[in-house]
């Protein structure tokens, strides 16, 4: 049976890094945020936090709070093999996917705001200032119900240490899932 792991966490927690480790283990990746980037490109907008936020909010207003799950469902179905989802955001997305993929499991990456804000400030793609990161945190928590999937995850990994420590934790989970 195909395994589907959705990685949840706040911005800068390490979701994309964990996803890369799953890919190394043979999982196929679906990044929910790609829908945002595709829509930004289609609209001819600049890639920045303001436009990303506007597109995310618009899609959810038009399609519902489970918009990203709906838009990514065909991609999940099309994959023959194990799937890792980078960045499931809302409780509604989780509920939508859980009905369609009962074997779906959540992995929560837990990282302190201080650590996340330092990482977000120096990341190569879409860096955020501390103020932008805090604003995004509050918007995601208040508007998306993002906390529920994080606290209700089947598995949790704390990502406060080195990259080697984090990779070891993710690899241990992948081995556990293979049993």
Image (spheres, helix red, strand yellow):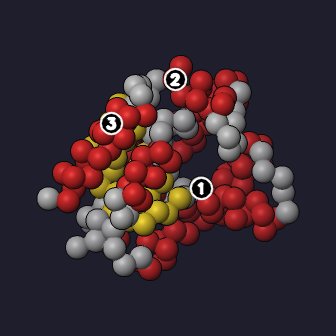
From the top left corner, tell me how far across and down residue 5 is, in percent: 34, 57
Q: Which residue is mark 2?
A: 115
Residue in the image at 76% along x and 60% along y: 40
Q: Position of residue 145 (x, y in %)?
A: 48, 42
What residue sits 78% from the left and 68% below the top? 42
3D distance between C-alphas at marks 1 and 3: 21 Å
Instruction: Decide which of tag 1 and tag 3 comes sooner along the chain.
Output: 1
Mark 2 or 1, nearer chain start: 1
Would you identify the image quadrant in which residue 43 lies? bottom right
Q: Is residue 126 left or right of residue 138?
A: right
Nearer to us of marks 2 and 1 is 2
160 or 43, nearer to the observer: 160
Task: Please state if 151 lies on the left or on the right of 142 as rendered.
Answer: left
Disc 3: CA contacts within 10 A as few (<14), some (14-19) or many (>=20): some
The residue beneath circle 1 is 33
* Mark 1, other Cα within 10 Å: few <14 / some 14–19 / many ≥20: some
Q: Which residue is mark 3?
A: 157
The quadrant the N terminus occupies is: bottom left
């Amino acid at each position: 049976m195909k395994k589907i792991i959705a990685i949840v966490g706040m911005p800068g927690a390490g979701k994309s890094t964990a996803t890369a480790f799953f890919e190394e283990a043979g999982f196929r990746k679906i990044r929910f945020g790609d829908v945002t980037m595709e829509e930004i490109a289609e609209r001819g907008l600049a890639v920045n936090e303001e436009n990303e936020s506007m597109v995310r909010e618009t899609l959810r207003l038009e399609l519902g709070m489970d918009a990203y799950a709906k838009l990514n469902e065909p991609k999940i179905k099309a994959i023959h093999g194990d799937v890792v989802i980078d960045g499931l955001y809302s409780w509604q997305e989780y509920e939508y996917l859980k009905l369609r993929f009962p074997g779906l499991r959540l992995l929560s990456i837990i990282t302190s705001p201080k650590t996340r804000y330092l990482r977000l400030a120096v990341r190569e793609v879409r860096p955020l200032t501390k103020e932008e990161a805090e604003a995004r945190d509050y918007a995601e928590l208040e508007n998306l119900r993002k906390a529920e999937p994080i606290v209700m995850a089947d598995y949790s990994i704390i990502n406060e240490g080195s990259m080697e420590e984090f990779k070891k934790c993710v690899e241990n989970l992948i081995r556990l899932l293979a049993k």
